[in-house]
Amino acid sequence: MVDILSEAVVAIRTGNPTSGMFVRHAPWGRRYPVVPGAGFHVVLEGSCWLVPPGGAPMALGVGDVVFMPRGADHSLVDSLGSSVTETAQPGEPREISGPGVRTALLCGAYGLGRQQSHPLLGELPEFVHLPARLGRHAALRGAVDLLVAEIAEPRPGSDAAVPALLDTLLLFILRAWLDDQARDHTTGWAGALADPAVAAALRAVHDDPARSWTVPDLSDVAGVSRATLARRFTATVGEPPLTYVTRWRMLTAARLLRETDGPIGVVARKVGYSSEFAFAKAFKREYGLAPGQYRRAEDKPPLVAV
C-alpha cells in the first residue's frame, strides 16, 4: 500500500539535512533569517521565546519542538527583554559561555524543491508548535533523543545515522501535527488521510502517476460517486482531483530530474506524457524553468546555516 505521507516528503526533500546543537547563557538573542527550505528547533535544556516579525511571541520549554515548513524569518531569545545580537551563519561558535541561565537547543534545516511544494506543507502554519506533553508523540520524542545522542557523542556510523534520523524526525513532526489536527478537524490533509474514499484515490494517483486518470476512474477506485469524490477530495485536499493529479505528476517529475540523469523523454513518460514537448511546456508552466534548466539549477542546492 502506498504511504502518501512518506511519498509526499520524498517528492519535495532535496540534498542532505543539516543540524547542530547550540548552547547559550542568558542574556542572548539569535536571529534566523528566511531559509530556502524548512527548519526546526528543539529545546533540550532551559527555555526561550520564539519571536516572529510582527507576530505574537511563543514560549518554549524543555522538549518543545517548533517546525517552520517554509523557513520563516524569526528570532529566539532567552527572555522578551533580551536583544538579538547574533544571526545564524556557518562557522559560528556552538557554545557561548556566560553567567546566566543555560539553554541548549537542537536546530536544523531541510532542503526542499524550489518553486513548487506539496499542498500538505502549504496547509501548515508558519510555525508548528508541538509542546512536550506527557504521553503525547512518544515516537517524536524518541527520534529527538536518538538524534541528540548521535550529535552530542559521535560514534562510528554517525555520519550515516544523523541524516537518517533527521529524515525520520521530519516525518514524525508531520505525523504529530496530523494527529493533533485529526482530533479536532475533519478537513485538510488530516481529513483526507482519514477519509477512506479520498485516501484510496490519493493512493491510486501516487501509485500510477503515468495513467490518464479521469474523475470516473478515481471514483471507481474510491467506491463512491463522481460528485461525492469531487466534493470530499476538494474539501480535504484543497484542490479538485485532476488538479492534484497534475501537481503530483510535476512533483514526481521534479524529483526524477533531481535524482536521476536519464533522458527527459523518459521522465516525461514516467509521469504520463507521451510527448517530450508537451511535458516540457507543462513543467515550465509549473516551475518557471524548462526541465533541463531545472535539473542544472537543482544540482547546486543553497547553503543553509542552522
Image: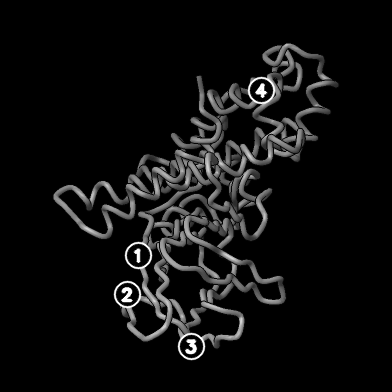
Nearer the viewer's eye, disc 3 or disc 4? 3
Who comes first in sequence, dot 2 or dot 1? Answer: 1
**Label 3 to label 1, Cα distance in Å?**
19 Å
Q: How many marks?
A: 4
Q: Which residue is mark 3?
A: 85
Who comes first in sequence, dot 3 or dot 4? Answer: 3
Q: Which residue is mark 1?
A: 20
**Label 2 to label 4, Cα distance in Å?**
47 Å
Q: Percent from the top left, x then y, of residue 116?
A: 59, 52
Q: Are marks 2 and 1 in contact (CB under 8 Å)?
A: yes
Who comes first in sequence, dot 3 or dot 2? Answer: 3
**Label 4 to label 1, Cα distance in Å?**
40 Å
Nearer the viewer's eye, disc 2 or disc 4? 2
Who comes first in sequence, dot 2 or dot 4? Answer: 2
Who comes first in sequence, dot 3 or dot 1? Answer: 1
Q: Are marks 3 and 2 in contact (CB under 8 Å)?
A: no
Amino acid type of disc 2?
Arg
Amino acid type of disc 3?
Thr
Amino acid type of disc 4?
Ala
Give SS at disc 1.
Answer: strand
Q: Which residue is mark 4?
A: 201
**Label 3 to label 2, Cα distance in Å?**
15 Å
Q: Percent from the top left, x then y, of residue 171?
A: 48, 42
Q: Quadrant location of residue 88?
A: bottom left
Give SS at disc 3.
Answer: loop
Q: Which residue is mark 2?
A: 94
Q: Percent from the top left, x then y, of residue 240?
A: 77, 34
Residue drawn 27% across the image and 47% down it? 161
Neighbour class for label 3 at 10 Å: few (<14), some, many (≥20)? Answer: few
View extreme (left): residue: 156
Q: Of 31 and 252, which appears nearest the observer?
A: 31
